[in-house]
Each structure stands twice: as C-alpha cells, then as structure tokens.
Amino acid sequence: MISAEKVLFNSVQKALQELYNINATDIIFQKTRKEFEGDFTLVTFPYIKETKKSPEQVGQDIGTYLEKNEKQVADFNIVKGFLNISLSNDFWLSYFNSVKDCTTIGMKDANSSGRTVMVEYASPNTNKPLHLGHIRNLLLGYSVANILKANGHKVIKVSIVNDRGIHICKSMLAWKKWGNNETPESSGMKGDHLVGKYYVLFDKEYKKQIEELVGAGKKKEEAEKLALLMLECQDMLLKWEAGDKATVDLWKMMNGWVYEGFAVTYKTVGVDFDKTYYESNTYILGKEIIQEGLAKNIFYRKENGSVAIDLTNEGLDEKIVLRSDGTSVYITQDIGTAIERFKEFPALKQLIYTVGNEQDYHFKVLFKILNKLGYDWAKECYHLSYGMVELPEGKMKSREGTVVDADDLLKEMFDTAEETTKDLGKVAEFTEAELQELYATIGSGALKYFMLKVDPKKKMLFNPKESIDFNGNTGPFIQYTHARIKSVLRKADVKFDAFFATVEFNSLEKEIIKWIYDFKGVVEESGKTFSPSLIANYVYEITKTFNRFYHEYSILKEEDENIKLFRLQLAKASAQTIANAMNLLGIPVPEKM
RNA sequence: GGUCCUAUAGCUCAGUUGGAUAGAGCACAGGUUUUCUAAACCUGCGGCCCUUGGUUCGAAUCCAAGUGGGACUACCA
C-alpha cells in the first residue's frame, strides 16, 4: 500500500500549488512528538517568506485544505509553526490489516535489489584467541550483513585470516622450544588458547633477553633486534617462506588448532561466513598490479628501488607499495585481494571492510590507490570503521594481560543468565538441553545488545566488574517482552486471524501500529548507514511502548470480542516485528523465559 | 607538524537530512501484583548539550577557532 508520507507529500504539494502557487519538491514530514496530538508534522516556517503569511496562517491554510481534499487526513492542529496532522483510523487500520499476518514485516524480498555486496569481518590473527574487541567486530559484521539482506541485497560474508608472518612464528617457536609436544588433547585446552599461551610465553622470554642485553650495555632498540629469540624467529619465517617441510608442518598443525578454537567461538557467538580467505594464499597478490601501475606512472620507483605513490595532493602522505627488495607490504596484498574479489564475483557491486578505526588511514589510502588504478568500483568500497572497546583503566593490551577473553566473557554471560533464570524460576518444565539453550540465548542476547546499541564509530566502555545488565534498556528486556507476548498468544482460546473492518483503537494501540509502520524505514536507514544501532534503539522503543500497553490493558480478558481479537493480532504483529528486528542484530528471541 | 574520530544527567548511551519544553537505562527515593510472565509498569530526583564566535525565522545538530580525550601518520601487520 501507498505510504503515509507519500500520501501527505502529494496532498501538501497540491495544496502549496493551489493555495500559493508554490512548486515544492522537498516537502519533509517528521513524526509528531508524543506530547502533541497527531501522526505527522509539517514545519511551516519554510513557506512564510514566499507566502508573506504567518507560520500559523500557513498551517491553517494547508491543514484546512488537507482536511477537505485528502480523505486519509482526519484532523489537524497547529502549534506555532508546526502543523500536526492526524491520519484517519481507516488508514492505520488498513495498514495494519496489510501487515498483521506477515512474517517479514519491514524486510524486503531476498535479492530484490539486484545488488551484490561483500561484507568482510572477523579477520583474526592465528596467534591468539579472540577477545572483546573481536566480538564487537563479529557482531557488527554479522548484523550489517543481515541488515543488507533485509534491504534486498545479496550478501557474501567473508573472513580473511592473518595466518602468516613474524607474529605467527613467535608462538610456533615458543611451542617448539618449551612445548613438550603439548596439544589441545593433552592439555585439555581449546586450541586457540593453547597457541595464545605460547605467544605470551615468547613475549615473556623475549623481554628477558632484551633486559639482559640492555644490562650488558646495549640500547633498547638494538637489543630488540639482537635478541636471540628474535633472530631465531626471523630464521623461522624465512624457512616458512622457503617452504621448509618441518616448519610448514608445524605451522599447519598449530593453525589447525586455532581454527578449531575459532570455530567454537564463532558458533557460540552465532556468526558464520560464506568464504574464508587466508593470507598465506593472498599475500602474493598485488605485485603485478604494482608493475602495471608503474607502467601507467601511477606509482614511481624511488632511488633505493622501492615503489611508492604520492598522495600528498589528496591530503595524505607518500605511501610505499613495494619494498626495495621487491617484497610486498600489507597494502600490496590488500590491493591485490580487492581486485581478485571483484574478478571472482563478477556481480559484486560493493565491498565492505569491518575493521577497527585505528586503520582509518590505511583504508583511505587503499581506496584512493584503487581509484587511481582506474577501478570504478573503488568508490563503492567502504570501511565499516568502529571504535575500540575500552576498559575502565584504558585500552586492552594483550601483553599486559588486560584483555577480556571472548570465550571467558561468553561463559560468564551464560552463567549470569542461568543464575537469574533460576532465581525467577519460570521455566520449571524445560529440559536440560532447553535450559542450556535458553541461557545461551539470554546471555549472548545481553552481550550482543549491549555492544550493538552503541553507534559503531564511537569507542565504547566495558566494565567487567559491573556485569552487563538484564534490566532496562537491554537484550533480555526485549527478549522477555517477546516471550511474554508469546505466552499470551499461546493462551488465546480463539482464532484471531480475521480481517478487521472496523476497530476503534486507543492511543497506545495506535502508537504500536505506528511503531510497526516505522520499522521498514529504520531498516532502510540502517542499511544506508551500515548502522545496527538504529535497529537496536528502534526495537527498544517499540518494546517499551508495548509493555506500557500490556500493563494498561488486558488482552485475553477484554470483553468486547472484536477488540480482543484485534489486540491479539496486534500483540502477534508486535512480537513478529520485535523478533525481526532482533534477528537483524543476530539476537534470538525465546518463546518462553 | 599533519590527518581523522570524539565531547549530551553522577555512570553508560540515544537524539534520521537543522525544528516544538534535549531523551532513555543504570544508580538514588517512593509506589504498583488474589487479574494475560514484576527480567515489567508508574512517580520523583537529576542538564552552561566542552568553550567562544558565525550562518538563520530557528543550532545539541551546520561552519570556524580553541580546549580535553583517542587513533593514525613504518620498506609492521
């Protein structure tokens, strides 16, 4: 059906034309604030110059015109320069009838936009387990992928694993030296944690060596390069690059442990990928492109033989794209990988990188280079940049042991959910398996909502001492509301799928219908801005409104049969909208809790 | 030095392209259940929207300068 905004736009445009001979194309309506009567508000200040009338008079003119000529407009009032318009009950009712049984409220049909988008997220290193910062990344990437799907795009979720390089060799070397063939099986440790243990061990021993060297009179920078462990590590990297069998086998074995560990964490968080890239395969990419760019004079060779690009005209600096020994730097492979992906998926229109904001500069440079190389899709590349997760004492530092481990945190959340659930004692008939699932649903719901409700680009604070709340503006609050609605629906002793020809709804019921109506626009907006927080804030608002309604009116005990049926249907549609919104955030909603 | 991000209640955060008296949650004080799940609902308390100037009918929002916080500016990844 035609949207309310479109109806109003057409009518107001005609009104301005007929009343004042103004041809307006940019008429904007906002939601009427709740302290005033009305559904949509037109601000009349913009028209006072041309009409030479007061804002109130303009409002009066347009309002009267609408009331007379637009049958969907039921009423209007004017407060200063604000024309508040109420649409007819018929409009809202017919809207409600059109969505009340729809399971896809607010969402567009799959692949209806004809646009294919790749979302890269996760991108871990294989030398340590995932931490809280990765969780923000996972949640954002996964949620944005969902939101883009809900906007009708085809989405390819990918991860690129940083599985090679000096830092990987560190944990390998430490394990070789001091590991005594320890395995995940023998130690009972999750693979990624085991490898992380040796990464930390390396750093500890390495620091000792540096101190010794400094004690012997070396400068710190010198000591860092001369330390035996570092030399051994570099030797190992050379062996790896030369394909030395023992080294490669060790690398494969330890990376295998890490992947098993990551897989568990991904599953617990509830995220997945359509394809995984490995840097050990992609780090070669990009070199030929540099040669082509040299030929086209986009890059230039410096005196020492390295290749660079001058971006000073763009407000950036000179950037090296190939070392003097001909080897790649990081951006070389990023250039190559991006080009590969567009070749691999010819329908691809956009590439989204979910990476922390410390790499803002890197991506600016990358996109600029791709643009200069002549790829017109470069302008569609987008860095989904997000702020760091900080602890009360500041940034997390893996070496200082102040990281919040992802697995530990999830476990804690599940435990808290279990504790709270047991305290409340509402799910006595659940089986053990159902209980475990419920704890995971609520615990991860709390964590996910906590992280996703914050605007991605802002840094966020996480205080481990104050565990994440389950009351108020939280995931469990929304999940609870959903479960409560479902409980009412289960208890309904009547069929309630009728079409409602006439219902006089009260102001809270109307407010809920309007919230449901708004969902579609919120999905669109969050898709355009890659912002799950809009969905999170929206779902909180509709949930709060429903709870007010629930408290003030009874559904099952309503005596007027027609109103009872309508309320049941309204509850059902609310639950569906809440579930859909939460689903976009990657948060499941329980039937009971 | 340069570039970018950020600043809103005691704390954590909202505030769609500029619009009405700036909103939530937590915390704090009080109230609501023989009635559909109280993980809920209601009331109260709480603000120089960092500062100063500018743009205009109108600025938390846009522009400029400054201040505080953060990130980046590698032949690291």
Image (cartoon, coloured by chain):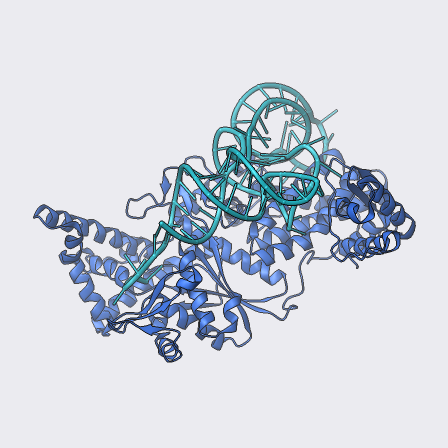
Q: Residue A145: where, in percent of width, then height?
A: 54, 60
Corner quadrant of residue A548 = top right
Taking A243 as reference, is A319 left or right? right
Instruction: Identify by letter the chain in cyan.
Output: B
- Asked if one can make out residue A427 in the rendered structure from this viewpoint, the answer is no
Q: Is residue A80 above or below residue A151?
A: above
Of all chains in the rendering, the one displayed in blue is A
Q: Is residue A243 above or below residue A363?
A: below
- Residue A406 on image: x %, y %: 40, 49
Residue at image coords 40%, 60%: A316
Residue A128 makes an appearance in the image: yes
Position of A201 relative to A113 (above/below)? above
Instruction: Describe residue A27's horizontal placement relative to residue A355 as left or right.
Output: right
Residue sitting nearer the eye, A95 or B61: B61
Residue A204 in the image: x percent, y percent? 21, 49
The outermost residue toward the left is: A216
